[in-house]
Amino acid sequence: MARVRCCTDLDKTVLTQNFDKRSWSSVSPDEDWNFYWASVVTVRSIFNPSNDHPRLTDNQVINHFPNHYELTRKDLMVKNIKRYRRELEKDGNLLCEKDDTGVHKYLDFIPVTYMMPADYNLFADDFRRDPNHTWIMKPAARAQGKGIFLINKMSQIKKWSRDGKSIPAAAPTRETFVISKYIDNPLLIGGKKFDLRLYVLVTSFKPLKCYL
């Protein structure tokens, strides 16, 4: 059986060590490879039809799907999940069933969320209806917990705006944030928040095929 030929353009020990454990053969990205763990910039270049990069063959795998940012950017993920809900509701799917208060029974894994600054007025109306609720604000395209803060006063939004983050009429180059209703009583460990990170291997979107 031929050895898997792998390559990466990232200097990450965890990758190279796992390649070695599997006795995979390391090659250059310019050579004939089977598995390429590539940076986002490289992936965009590979999938860009205007570039001269050859199409992937049946025996080549890369660590991203085309347009993967539709799920990895927070604002685009929210947009797509809302669209998914609308499509299910249109089809009368049972997954869209709501309780007596109008809350989804099964599609409640995403809280009420707005894009800022685009949805500023919608958010402001919602905030005024329930001024005692706490909201969490996150940059749409950052990771590792950077730039996240809590909001429980409209004055904090105004300060964020004055700091140059944006208001509804701001320039389109301003950074986009998402703001979501915060969980009233979050589960804590030792008085602190925590998260569980699960890695899912998705080998196909149509049909959807995932391995957890």
Image: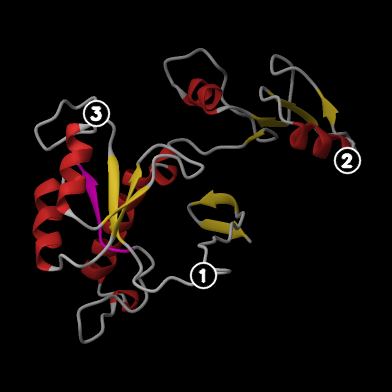
* Magenta-drawn segment: 111-116
Q: Which residue has dot 2 on it?
A: 21
- Report, in whole angstroms, how far the alpha carbon at label 2 lies from the one at label 3: 44 Å
Crowding at dot 2, Cα within 10 Å, few <14 / some 14-19 / many 20+, comes out as: few
- Quadrant where the image shows the C terminus: bottom right
Q: Earlier in the sequence, mark 1 or mark 3?
A: 3
Q: How many marks?
A: 3
> Which image quadrant for residue 140?
top left
Q: Where is residue 127 in the image (x, y as percent from the top left)?
A: 15, 60
Comparing 192 with 197, the one in front is 192
- Amino acid at pointer 3: Arg
Q: Is residue 118 visible?
A: no
- Amino acid at pointer 1: Leu
Residue at (51%, 42%) from the top-left corner? 144
- Quadrant where the image shows the N terminus: top right
- Amino acid at pointer 2: Lys
